Image (spheres, grey):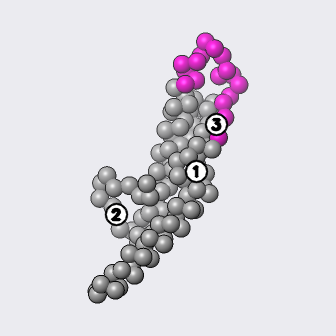
Amino acid sequence: MNIGQMMRQVQDMQTKMADMQNRLGEVDVTGQSGGGMVTVTMNGKAEMRKIVLDPKLLNVDEKEMLEDLIVAATNDAKAKAEAMISGETEKMMGGLKLPPGVKLPF
């Protein structure tokens, strides 16, 4: 492979990455905790879009539990977003796996 071909491949990969990042901003994932009492919706860029709380949780005496459930639901949604990103990245790279610790697109 010559340098020109390699540069074209790099440019193609950059274009594919930009397209993937745009698509990820448009796709939502939802995480849950407390048996669905707390749901958090994020886009594929792990930006929180929405949080829904079961009204039964709105009790001052249960404040700490509610906070824990929000954290758990957020972490669940983030894990789903990361799994989606990983899958999209693998598809884009033709199944080539990245070394451990390397995360794309951010």
Q: Is residue 18 left or right of residue 52?
A: left
Magenta residues, as a range?
50-67
Residue at 51 percent across and 31 percent down: it is: 71
Kindly identify which residue carries mark 3: 51
Q: Amino acid at mark 1?
A: Asn
Pair 2/3: label in front: 3
* Magenta-colored stretch includes residue 14: no
Q: Give the mark nearer the N terminus: 3 vs 1.
A: 1
Density class for disc 1 (Cα within 10 Å; few <14, some 14-19, many ≥20) is many
Q: Amino acid at mark 3?
A: Ile
Q: Quadrant of residue 48?
A: top right
Res 86 visible = no
Helix, strand or loop for disc 2: loop
Res 67 visible = yes
Kindly identify which residue carries mark 1: 43
Q: Amino acid at mark 2?
A: Lys
Kindly identify which residue carries mark 2: 97
Q: Is residue 104 left or right of residue 50?
A: left
* Magenta-colored stretch includes residue 51: yes
